[in-house]
Image (cartoon, grey):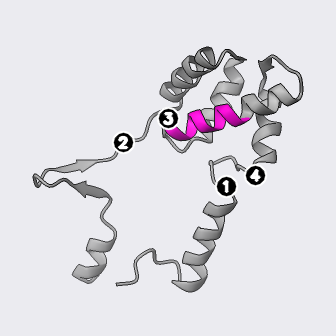
Amino acid sequence: MLQQEQECYQVHLEIDSGIIEKLELYTKDELDMIIRRSADILGVTIDKEASIEIAGRSRGTPRIANRLLKRVADYATVLNNSNISEEIANLALGKLEIDKIGLDNIDRKILNTIIDIYKGRACWN
């Protein structure tokens, strides 16, 4: 593999100080705790199964977990349901077209573009 291609596939960030940091994603259990806490702050109740479902589609990031929780809570409110169950979470996430690994329509379009135009390579240097 060429040096340029190797550099393209590195998955770490180099901070100004020259220190290399690795990004670590949150686990489902950690996201579950964050989602349950956020649900309390929002004043909604959520079943453990629903929280785990949202966590699984959050791509390891609390920001996405909280965004999905808010959308699912809105959907539950429209249904006049005060509790977010796993069924409601799945219905809401389905309406949002968030798949089981957390990709939405835009994510899928980006991946298809990388595959179709750049022959599957995310780097075009």
Residues at badges 4 and 1 in contact (C-beta under 8 Å)?
A: yes
Distance from the alpha carbon under mark 3 to that under mark 2: 12 Å
Q: Which residue is mark 2?
A: 24
Number of other residues with Cα within 10 Å of mark 4, as a class: few under 14, some 14 to 19, many 20 or more: some
Distance from the alpha carbon under mark 3 to that under mark 1: 17 Å
Q: Earlier in the sequence, mark 3 or mark 2?
A: 2
Vertical arrangement, residue 10 with respect to residue 69, above or below: below
Vertical arrangement, residue 56 with respect to residue 122, above or below: above
Q: Is residue 4 magenta?
A: no
Residue lying furthest left: 17
Distance from the alpha carbon under mark 4 to that under mark 3: 19 Å
Distance from the alpha carbon under mark 2 to that under mark 4: 26 Å
Type of amino acid under label 3? Pro
User: On the image, which quarter does residue 105 sit in?
Assistant: bottom right
Q: Earlier in the sequence, mark 1 or mark 2?
A: 2
| Residue under the image location 52 percent in, 20 percent down | 33
Q: Which residue is mark 4?
A: 97
Residue 19 pos. (x, y %): 13, 50
User: On the image, which quarter does residue 123 sit in?
Assistant: bottom left
Q: Which residues are magenta?
A: 63-71
Q: Earlier in the sequence, mark 4 or mark 3?
A: 3
Distance from the alpha carbon under mark 4 to that under mark 1: 6 Å
Distance from the alpha carbon under mark 1 to that under mark 2: 22 Å
Q: Which type of secondary structure does the marked residue at label 2 adopt?
A: loop
Type of amino acid under label 2? Glu
Q: Which residue is mark 3?
A: 62
- The N terminus - image quarter: bottom left
Residues at badges 3 and 1 in contact (C-beta under 8 Å)?
A: no
Residue 3 pos. (x, y %): 22, 80
Q: What mark, if any, has residue 104 been given in the picture? A: 1
| Residue under the image location 49 percent in, 40 percent down | 60
